[in-house]
Image (cartoon, grey):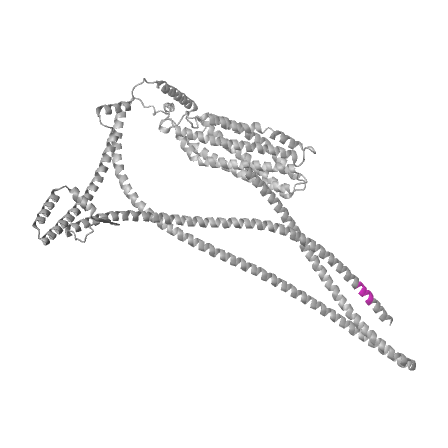
Amino acid sequence: MVKQIDFCFLCFQLRAQNQVLKKGVVDEQANSAALKEQLKMKDQSLRKLQQEMDSLTFRNLQLAKRVELLQDELALSEPRGKKNKKSGESSSQLSQEQKSVFDEDLQKKIEENERLHIQFFEADEQHKHVEAELRSRLATLETEAAQHQAVVDGLTRKYMETIEKLQNDKAKLEVKSQTLEKEAKECRLRTEECQLQLKTLHEDLSGRLEESLSIINEKVPFNDTKYSQYNALNVPLHNRRHQLKMRDIAGQALAFVQDLVTALLNFHTYTEQRIQIFPVDSAIDTISPLNQKFSQYLHENASYVRPLEEGMLHLFESITEDTVTVLETTVKLKTFSEHLTSYICFLRKILPYQLKSLEEECESSLCTSALRARNLELSQDMKKMTAVFEKLQTYIALLALPSTEPDGLLRTNYSSVLTNVGAALHGFHDVMKDISKHYSQKAAIEHELPTATQKLITTNDCILSSVVALTNGAGKIASFFSNNLDYFIASLSYGPKAASGFISPLSAECMLQYKKKAAAYMKSLRKPLLESVPYEEALANRRILLSSTESREGLAQQVQQSLEKISKLEQEKEHWMLEAQLAKIKLEKENQRIADKLKNTGSAQLVGLAQENAAVSNTAGQDEATAKAVLEPIQSTSLIGTLTRTSDSEVPDVESREDLIKNHYMARIVELTSQLQLADSKSVHFYAECRALSKRLALAEKSKEALTEEMKLASQNISRLQDELTTTKRSYEDQLSMMSDHLCSMNETLSKQREEIDTLKMSSKGNSKKNKSR
């Protein structure tokens, strides 16, 4: 909460600084525009003066040439004048006429030259203006083209991303469709099974219903649920889960009401402190009688706000595990409604003083037009807040009627009243959001005032934090009530049998007394029993006495162990049978080999001995033959199992050998196929899981990259904005200093040019006077 308040405070400070900077930028732009216009005017006047100076220099040159010509003519005419005065008088007349003609021509040329200079200057100015407009238009068109290209690039990227997303969604939907088809098949099979079970259950229940109806008609003498007056006195079944749920909900509501009460106390207290500070500080001057009365009423807010928490606490304590919680039994809701009524009377009492106080702030000399508009909005919000509290109090008073006046509210209207309470809470949340918004704007405007003190700033921040806490508390209560609204409506049917409900608070109180009596009677029936052998122990002892053998579990374990041993012994038996057959084959071959040797030597005695040895070896036990077979053969192991072969090059019996190999290979093939099928099914399952996990991983990595890029962009934007703020400040300061220096230099150059023009005018006047005198 403190972090949120600090964050809001920082946001407000940044907004205030941003507004100040914006105003400074706008002022500097206006000043720069005015200075540019002045500069243009000065340039135009300078150009006019330069044109005048050029025209004057040209005229002075013409006059100087004319004077030289006249002086030459005068020098020529002086010697002749002595000789011929008459000719001199005629030449003077001619010279005067020529002078007047020359003056007229000179004047016409001067005027034509001025007109040509003016036309040339106007054409040049028009050309520059058109060139500047075309350049600005070209720059705007280039920027628009760049913006359009950026938009096109963004749209193409967006469309490619959407195409990839749609492709991924298509793959997912295909997988989902396959799984849904499988589930549909399974559901069809289940529905068939359920239909069969439903038929059997229907037949069973119909038979039970007929049996129970016959028993009720024959053996039940009195039906206490037929009349509602008697039914209301029946003790309902104890629903411990319902009571625990209601107590949990009441505990959550108590926590929300406590937060709301603390926020209201802070709001009224800080409002009282603000009245003592603004618009007139009580430490410096006396505040108005209206604000004194308003401060006195606000000082009493705790006596109206604290009982709300106490009433909700009593309501929470009245909901226990042993009671039955419905509207007819919640008597403490009436006290909470009364405390809320007293608080609404307090709001009605302070509302006109609050409106008049805001009007007094608007009438003060420090109030601007924006601040006056925010004060008007706050006055409207305070009216809405009082109206919302009144609306909420009416609905809570209606909900408290079933516990005091049974005819005040019908049971069919309970759900509509609860929905209206939820709507009123949402309206209260909306009003508090408007108040928070308008008061934050008002505080930001007041912080920019030159007379804003630190005490006023801290008080506004405290009021704003309390308003934010009120907004959050109202939002939590509204969401909490809307989430549990369905449960409230469903829990209204919790009552006596046949769901007819309690008729009056008196019957509900009687029912609770009967419940307590029944609980006390059940406790009295619980007497300590005499010590005896438990039933389970007695049964166990009887089994032990009847059978001297071990317990059933031990016998089952012994049977299982013996079966395992038998299976192992059978496997060993088969192995040794194969070894014995191989040993027999080897023995026959050995006997044949010995007989062949004896025939070759021709010794009859050796033949008899060999036959006797063969007979003895055949009738003897299989242990010696198997021992010889184990010593002589060589075993070869591979993926198909273990195969025993002899070291000699003799060939065994073909048929027996082929049968053994065939049986061995068939068993091994069956085992390998089963293992292969199991491995294939596991591999398919693992492949599907790995594919889904890889897709999830890819999506998570994409989202991670996008979030990191957004974070980088946000940090870059923050640093860029900070740098722009510093650079704009510095650039504006540098521009102001440069413009001031430039204006000073322009003024100096203008003063110098004026002095030069004055000197030229004086010199031209002197020359004109000299020419006239000449």
Q: Is residue 424 visible?
A: no
Q: Nearer the viewer, residue 308 or 230?
A: 308
Q: Is residue 763 magenta?
A: yes
Q: Nearer the viewer, residue 582 or 138?
A: 582
Quarter the N terminus occupies = top right
x 37%, y 48%: residue: 690
Which of the 4 quarters of the picture holds residue 496?
Answer: top left
Q: Tell me what residue is drawn at x 19 percent, y 41 percent.
A: 573
Q: Quadrant of residue 510?
A: top left
Image height of 69 relative to 725, above or below: below
| Placement of 465 over or under 713, stated as above or below | above
Residue 245 placement, left or right of 196: right
Image coordinates of residue 544 in percent, x first then y, are: 24, 24
Does 495 appear above or below 32? above
Q: Give how far across and how far down residue 478 sits, in percent.
A: 48, 36
Q: Position of residue 168 (x, y in %)?
A: 40, 52
Residue in front for this viewpoint, 290 or 690: 690
Q: Which residues are magenta?
A: 757-764
Q: Is residue 760 left or right of residue 277?
A: right
Among all residues in the image, which is located at the extreme bottom? 83
Q: Quadrant of the C terminus?
A: bottom right
Q: Name the side, left or right, on which 8 lies relative to 327.
A: right
Q: Is residue 92 above or below residue 471?
A: below
Q: Position of residue 354 (x, y in %)?
A: 61, 34
Majority secondary structure in the magenta region = helix
Total marks in image: 0
Q: Quadrant of residue 294?
A: top right
Q: Residue at x 65, y 31 (%)?
A: 292
Say whether residue 379 is magenta: no
